[in-house]
């Protein structure tokens, strides 16, 4: 445990306190305001990046966590609104232009995940919301939005090099894949201490890098003692998401926050460590609050 510094202890306490406070304090109304604020903040950063440019240190990864992340969350919210929100044509055009500004800003930051995950999260939320509706006529009415889903995927397939996919196709031996080696090494360390784990920052100390999988990261950090509560949170999140999607025809606003939370979870599963996971977990708490009684 000698690799646990004072900074790590402070970050761990902040993670516990912020997530606990979010689960206790969020209401459906405050969760809605959170979605609006995230959309406004990400849009502001995107416009600022395009017009003026944000000074950041790439060596510290600031272009990922402090710039690309809020833009990606906001872009996801805009896309979900475009696809599943109850908006007028004028509002659709404004949001479409805003989404374009988001994409341009992300293109200057070289963040592939912030470009790839928003359309995946938004399309998944939209498709599930359509599938949950009983009337076939509603599907026909959403045909133009389904066409939009197809169109927005074209720039991504042409402009983004899917390096991870290319690496897999070029491998002569799957065991040579870097992330597979990280997964195997993380699993081996988990087997050494399956119940209690190896403590916070274990992935950096034992593997030298984030384990690139949030479930492995949790198990490596706290073993089954931490993994089981985390799994329970994910089950609650899934059930809450199911309820939100089932009521999408009545109230589509919670879908925006659901898309944002899904983007954050996808992002953290591949890019960030457990100590910074207060961002997706706070959004998960907000989703849970949306299903406390009826939507307001």
Image (cartoon, rainbow, N blue to C red):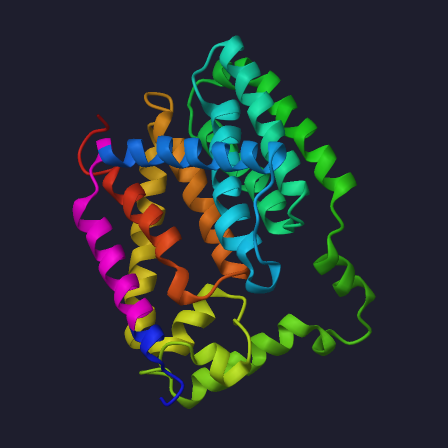
User: Against 150, is 201 above or below?
Assistant: below
Return the x and y of residue 115 as percentages of the image width and height: 62, 43
Count of picture labels: 0
Lateral position of residue 286 relative to residue 257, left or right = left
Residues in magenta, as a range: 10-29
Lateral position of residue 225 relative to residue 269, left or right = left
Q: Quadrant of the C terminus?
A: top left
Q: Is residue 269 magenta?
A: no
Q: Quadrant of the N terminus?
A: bottom left
Q: Is residue 25 magenta?
A: yes
Q: Residue at x 58, y 38 (%)?
A: 49
Q: Residue at x 43, y 32 (%)?
A: 39
Return the x and y of residue 244 as percentages of the image width and height: 34, 34
User: Against 6, is 2 above or below?
Assistant: below
Lateral position of residue 253 relative to residue 108, left or right = left
Residue in front for this viewpoint, 240 or 258: 258
Residue in front for this viewpoint, 200 or 284: 200
Q: Residue at x 53, y 35 (%)?
A: 75
Lateral position of residue 202 relative to residue 93, left or right = left
Q: Residue at x 35, y 74 (%)?
A: 8
Return the x and y of residue 93 as percentages of the image width and height: 57, 15
Give the image quarter of residue 215: bottom left
User: Against 23, is 258 above or below?
Assistant: above
Q: Main secondary structure of the magenta part?
A: helix
């Amino acid at each position: 445990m000698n690799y646990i510094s004072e900074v790590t202890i402070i970050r761990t306490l902040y993670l516990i306190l912020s997530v606990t406070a979010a689960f206790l304090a969020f209401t459906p109304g405050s969760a809605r305001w959170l979605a609006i604020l995230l959309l406004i903040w990400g849009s502001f950063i995107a416009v600022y990046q395009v017009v003026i440019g944000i000074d950041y240190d790439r060596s510290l990864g600031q272009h990922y966590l402090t710039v690309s992340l809020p833009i990606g969350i906001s872009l996801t919210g805009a896309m979900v609104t475009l696809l599943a929100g109850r908006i007028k044509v004028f509002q659709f055009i404004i949001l479409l232009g805003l989404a374009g500004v988001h994409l341009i800003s992300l293109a200057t930051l070289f963040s592939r995940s912030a470009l790839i995950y928003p359309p995946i999260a938004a399309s998944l939320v939209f498709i599930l919301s359509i599938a949950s509706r009983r009337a076939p006529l509603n599907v026909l009415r959403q045909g133009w939005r389904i066409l939009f889903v197809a169109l927005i995927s074209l720039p991504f397939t042409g402009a983004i090099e899917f390096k991870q996919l290319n690496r897999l196709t070029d491998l002569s031996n799957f065991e040579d894949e870097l992330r597979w080696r990280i997964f195997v090494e993380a699993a081996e360390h988990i087997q050494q201490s399956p119940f209690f784990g190896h403590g916070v920052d274990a992935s950096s100390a034992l593997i030298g890098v984030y384990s690139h999988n949030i479930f492995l990261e949790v198990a490596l950090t706290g073993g089954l003692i931490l993994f089981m509560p985390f799994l329970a949170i994910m089950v609650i999140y899934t059930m809450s998401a199911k309820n939100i999607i089932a009521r999408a025809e009545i109230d589509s606003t919670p879908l925006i926050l659901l898309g944002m939370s899904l983007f954050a979870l996808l992002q953290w599963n591949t890019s960030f460590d457990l100590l910074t996971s207060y961002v997706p977990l706070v959004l998960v708490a907000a989703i849970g609050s949306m299903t406390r009684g009826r939507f307001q």
